[in-house]
Amino acid sequence: MTNKKVFSSFFFYGFILIICSVIVYYPSLYNGFFCWDDQTVALDPAYRHLTFAGIVHSFFTFHAGLYHPLTSISFMLDYTPGMAALSRFI
């Protein structure tokens, strides 16, 4: 195979891949924004402060029917003033 044929084959398959991706994900452009965790995370006052009581509470309770204490502590870190920028790197 020559370099020209390899390049055109690579370009052709890349183009096919892009077209298939557009066809698959095109309907998602018309979906509205939704958020299922507004009441359980964003508006919950328990996640507004990182406290010892909040950490203990997150390890001994189920949240939204699931047990995920590290995620709950991560939410507390996100809402703590000054920690929002740092918590993105943790």
Image (cartoon, rainbow, N blue to C red):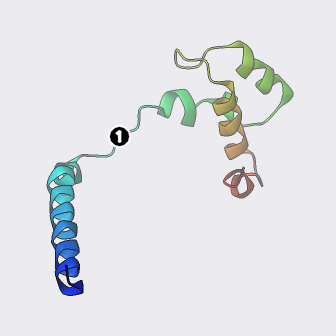
Name the spot of residue 71 as percent of width and height, x first: 64, 32
Label 1 element class: loop
Query: In the figure, is residue 2 to the left or right of 54?
Result: left
Task: Name the residue beneath numbered marker 1.
Answer: 34
What residue appears at the point 71 percent right and 33 percent down from the top-left corner? 73
Q: Is residue 87 above or below residue 47?
A: below
Quarter residue 67 falls in: top right
What residue appears at the point 67 percent right and 13 percent down from the top-left corner? 61
Depth check, front residue: 10 or 37: 10
Classify mark 1: residues with Cα within 10 Å, few (<14), some (14-19) or many (20+): few
Depth check, front residue: 82 or 43: 82
Name the spot of residue 19 as percent of width and height, x first: 15, 62
Q: Amino acid at mark 1?
A: Phe
Name the spot of residue 46 as percent of width and height, x first: 69, 28
Q: Is residue 81 above or below residue 9?
A: above
What residue appears at the point 59 percent right and 19 percent down from the top-left corner? 63
